[in-house]
Image (tube, rainbow, N blue to C red):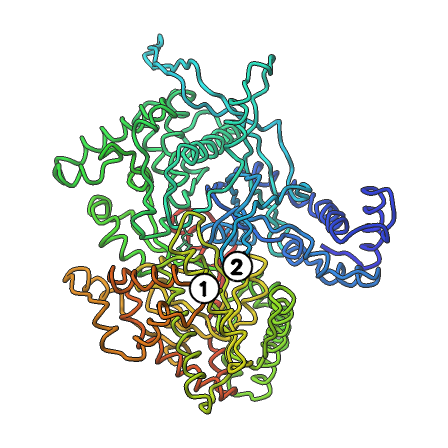
């Protein structure tokens, strides 16, 4: 949209007056943020209304992306960017004596997700709007997001994240669109005159699902889509006193707090209630909306796609069956055909413990009607498939088995598409995790490699880099990230490489300033910024990175004359509160940081910064400042990774195992521009098959490794006698589940190579450039276009691949 600086200033001052009945000098940065948010909503309002109207009038197919997590990050700057208002607003604020950065920092960052899965959902919302796809998000409006992490004496402490305390400027509460979700009680089916069955419910606990909508603004295209998050409330009732306090609490609890588990199934009745709550409310509202325009449900498959982001929303399958049969009078066969046509499922992990299952007794008690339907799905599956695949395989793969409802199997059986998120991951789904179901439905399996929103992760997070790219390529790359590859032409232009170094230094200074103020740690910006940011999990192997730090520490202590380029090791990672081992690693890193950072022999040659409370906003600060991107999971364990893509796009070189999308990154940027190492997935599976991994052999064979490991238990690192012993034992007594010791040597070798290569800044920046130029391949726009083409069958703005 067009907006002059002068007009903006007038509008902004008027907004301040209306909201606060005072003038600008009397407002806080947060107050200014709220006013700016209101103003942007006003500017964008016509787009949002027009978008919904156009979808309705043209009766376009709509996709509903169901996800129990969304991690959108702050929206102020991304809305400004996508509306094309960044320049006049920044300028106008400056003329008023304000700073956009300050105001943006006052915006709460909604932590409605744990990690990669939730952030991916948010990147995809941005891309759907930017592609002009009729894409809707559907999730939960948690009153408390993921816990706020602080460190006390080096230990992780979790504080509540009260992100809604001052309200949310972007959301619209739509009580008129609320629906009822039923739990518990009894249900029985009564035959009707026309031969159909009608359910009668008694003693159910009814919960009111109230939607809150947030506009998802497309990239300069006038499109604003909707992210709908549901909140659980007391149903409107004539006699409110009927609800006891316990009942009120039970309702309140449903959308109160996000489960802090990542790559782990949370086996709690409350989690199951959350899952059914947003699945049911979402599907009800889809059908209600659809029925406004259509008679009957025959066209459902042409007009609606429902995407199941990991197994948490799988109950959309039996819920759609329920509504089609009980409310729309479909036969089983018609309902089943429509359901499978509409549904598609993405798997995000191969970790066994993340494959959700629910005890049948719990499921039946909480969702009696849904249970009847799942039993029926199970019965049909067994009847259809046993003659072809035999009883053993069908028993292994049916939705009901071992006293459990098996969500992943239900998701595959009830969908027309199942995808993994990187080629290796999809391959492992076919050959390992979902092997038996792949035998039954080979045509359903496909790969959709993850992607990231370069708008947020380059244009917003790294303005200096974006401006430099503009100088060379113009601005088209901002809407077509694949054009980044044209940067390759400048690899031999020394002046440009120098500018790249200058950009990186500027970003390192910004991060160093933050670390100085938060951790009181002074950093050299000519040091190698070696970054690992992701959830704390044994398979992600922060521990391997720790061993490199110990090795560097010992090397400086023992051979002070040997000079390597200075290093800063930067971590950001939350551990699930109940994940004891991960928390021990946090304590170890903090204790090591304490030792290293205060040792006068070390000085500024080596620093360790564990930045607390990692999340989207901190990612935007850390990623542009990284030289090295640590992607060091045990091969086969990381489904894809997405921080690997964000770091690459910002010119960090990957120190990476051949796991997840690292493989594709290494291929896209070229082996020579990354630092691959370690066991392959095949080698890891080889160990599993032969059962001949002996971690202790590596310890015995490599004196340097032995020396490093011994520091865990010999008092070298003060304050970790318990944690050090626990970790040491996990490696040597319990045989190192994630092959840390097997990969140590090749990892260290690449770390040495990095220290060597970093000294030639020209060559280093050429490699960084190769990474930036290749990053366009991993644009979320391209990924979402592939979902639209292959899975959802939806037309969209064409993209130049
Ligand atoms: C993550 C995967 O661990 C990561 O490799 C991938 O890039 C990301 O999803 C997006 O696809 N998985 C989760 O965050 C998660 O919670 C458990 O998985 C269901």
Reply above or below: 328 against 644.
above
Reply above or below: 430 against 139.
below
Question: Which corner quadrant of the image does residue 730 belong to?
Answer: bottom left
The answer to whether residue 36 is left or right of residue 251 is right
Q: Label 1: state its secondary structure.
A: loop
- Check disc 2: other Cα within 10 Å, few if <14, some if 14-19, many if 20+: few
First along the sequence among labels 1 and 2: 2
Where does residue 686 sit, x and y in percent of width and height? 18, 64
The answer to whether residue 30 is left or right of residue 670 is right
The answer to whether residue 495 is left or right of residue 777 is right
Where does residue 618 sit, x and y in percent of width and height? 57, 60
Residue located beneath label 1 in the image: 719
- Nearer to us in this view, 636 or 191: 636
Measuring 55% from the left and 55% from the top, which residue is drawn there?
Answer: 150
Where does residue 353 sit, x and y in percent of width and height? 31, 47
Question: Which corner quadrant of the image does residue 239 belong to?
Answer: top right
Residue 529 in sight: no
For the N terminus, the image quarter is bottom right
Measuring 24% from the left and 73% from the top, which residue is drawn there?
Answer: 698
- Label 1 close to label 2 by CB (< 8 Å): yes
Where does residue 465 sit, x and y in percent of width and height? 60, 73
Q: Does mark 1's beta carbon lie closer than 8 Å to ligand 1?
A: no
Measuring 87% from the left and 45% from the top, which residue is drawn there?
Answer: 22
Q: Label 2: state its secondary structure.
A: loop
Q: Which mark is residue 153?
A: 2
Measuring 27% from the left and 70% from the top, which residue is drawn there?
Answer: 742
């Amino acid at each position: 949209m067009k907006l002059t600086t002068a007009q903006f200033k007038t509008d902004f001052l008027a907004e301040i007056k209306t909201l606060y009945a005072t003038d600008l000098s009397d407002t806080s940065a947060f107050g200014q943020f709220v006013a700016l948010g209101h103003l942007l909503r006003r500017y964008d309002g016509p787009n949002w209304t027009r978008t919904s109207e156009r979808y309705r009038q043209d009766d376009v197919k709509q996709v509903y992306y169901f996800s129990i997590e969304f991690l959108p990050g702050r929206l102020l700057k991304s809305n400004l960017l996508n509306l094309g208002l960044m320049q006049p607003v920044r300028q106008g604020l400056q003329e008023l004596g304000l700073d956009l950065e300050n105001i943006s920092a006052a915006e709460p960052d909604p932590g409605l997700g744990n990690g990669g899965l939730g952030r991916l959902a948010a990147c995809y919302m941005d891309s759907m709007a930017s592609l002009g796809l009729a894409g809707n998000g559907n999730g939960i409006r948690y009153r408390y997001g993921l816990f706020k992490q602080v460190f006390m004496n080096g230990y992780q402490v979790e504080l509540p994240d009260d992100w809604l305390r001052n309200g949310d400027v972007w959301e619209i509460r739509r009580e008129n669109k609320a629906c009822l979700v039923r739990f518990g009680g009894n249900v029985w089916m009564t035959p009707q005159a026309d031969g159909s069955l009608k359910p009668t419910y008694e003693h159910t606990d009814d919960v009111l699902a109230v939607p809150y909508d947030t506009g998802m603004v497309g990239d300069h295209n006038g499109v604003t889509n909707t992210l709908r998050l549901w909140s659980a409330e007391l149903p409107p009732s004539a006699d409110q006193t009927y609800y006891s306090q316990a009942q009120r609490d039970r309702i309140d609890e449903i959308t109160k707090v996000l489960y802090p588990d990542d790559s782990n199934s949370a086996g709690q009745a409350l989690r199951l209630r959350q899952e059914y709550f947003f699945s049911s409310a979402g599907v009800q509202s889809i059908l209600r909306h659809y029925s406004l325009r259509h008679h009957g449900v025959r066209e459902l498959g042409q007009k609606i796609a429902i995407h199941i982001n990991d197994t948490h929303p799988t109950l959309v399958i039996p819920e759609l069956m329920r509504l089609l049969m009980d409310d729309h009078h479909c036969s089983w066969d018609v309902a089943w055909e429509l359901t499978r046509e509409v549904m598609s499922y993405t798997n995000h992990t191969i970790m066994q413990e993340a494959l959700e299952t629910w005890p049948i007794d719990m499921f039946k008690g909480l969702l009696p009607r849904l249970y009847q339907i799942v039993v029926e799905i199970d019965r049909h599956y067994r009847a259809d498939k046993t003659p072809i695949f035999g009883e053993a395989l069908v028993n292994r793969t049916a939705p009901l088995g071992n006293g459990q409802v098996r969500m992943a199997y239900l998701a595959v059986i009830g969908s027309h598409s199942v995808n993994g998120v990187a080629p290796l991951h999809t391959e492992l789904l076919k050959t390992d995790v979902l092997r038996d179901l792949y035998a039954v439905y080979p045509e359903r399996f496909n790969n959709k490699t993850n992607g990231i929103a370069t708008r947020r992760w380059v244009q917003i997070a790294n303005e200096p880099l974006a401006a430099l790219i503009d100088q060379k390529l113009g601005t088209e790359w901002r809407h077509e990230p694949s054009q980044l590859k044209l940067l390759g032409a400048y690899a031999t232009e020394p002046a440009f490489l120098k500018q790249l170094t200058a950009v990186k230094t500027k970003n390192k200074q910004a991060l160093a300033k933050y670390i100085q103020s938060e951790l009181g740690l002074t950093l050299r910006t000519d040091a190698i910024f070696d970054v690992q940011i992701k959830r704390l999990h044994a398979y992600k192997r922060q521990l391997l990175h720790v061993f490199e730090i110990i090795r560097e520490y010992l090397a400086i202590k023992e051979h002070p004359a040997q000079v390597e380029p200075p290093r800063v090791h930067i971590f950001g990672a939350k551990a699930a509160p109940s994940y004891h081992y991960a928390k021990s690693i946090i304590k170890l890193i903090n204790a090591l940081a304490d030792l290293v950072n205060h040792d006068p022999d070390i000085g500024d040659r080596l620093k360790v910064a564990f930045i607390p409370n990692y999340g989207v906003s901190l990612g935007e600060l850390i990623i542009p400042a990284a030289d090295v991107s640590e992607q060091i999971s045990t091969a086969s364990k990381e489904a894809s990774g997405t921080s690997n893509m964000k770091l690459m796009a910002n010119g960090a070189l990957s120190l990476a195992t051949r796991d997840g999308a690292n493989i594709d990154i290494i291929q896209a940027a070229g082996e020579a521009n990354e630092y691959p190492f370690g066991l392959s997935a095949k080698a890891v599976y080889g160990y599993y098959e032969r059962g001949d991994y002996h971690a202790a052999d590596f310890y015995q064979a490599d004196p340097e490794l032995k020396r490093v490991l011994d520091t865990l238990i010999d008092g070298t690192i003060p304050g970790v006698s318990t944690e050090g012993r626990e970790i040491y034992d996990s490696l040597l007594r319990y045989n190192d589940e994630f092959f840390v010791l097997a990969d140590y040597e090749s990892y260290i070798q690449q770390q040495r190579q990095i220290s060597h290569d970093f000294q030639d800044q020209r060559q280093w920046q050429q490699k960084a450039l190769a990474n930036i130029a290749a990053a366009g391949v991993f644009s979320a726009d391209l990924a979402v276009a592939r979902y639209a083409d292959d899975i959802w069958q939806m037309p969209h703005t064409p993209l130049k691949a």
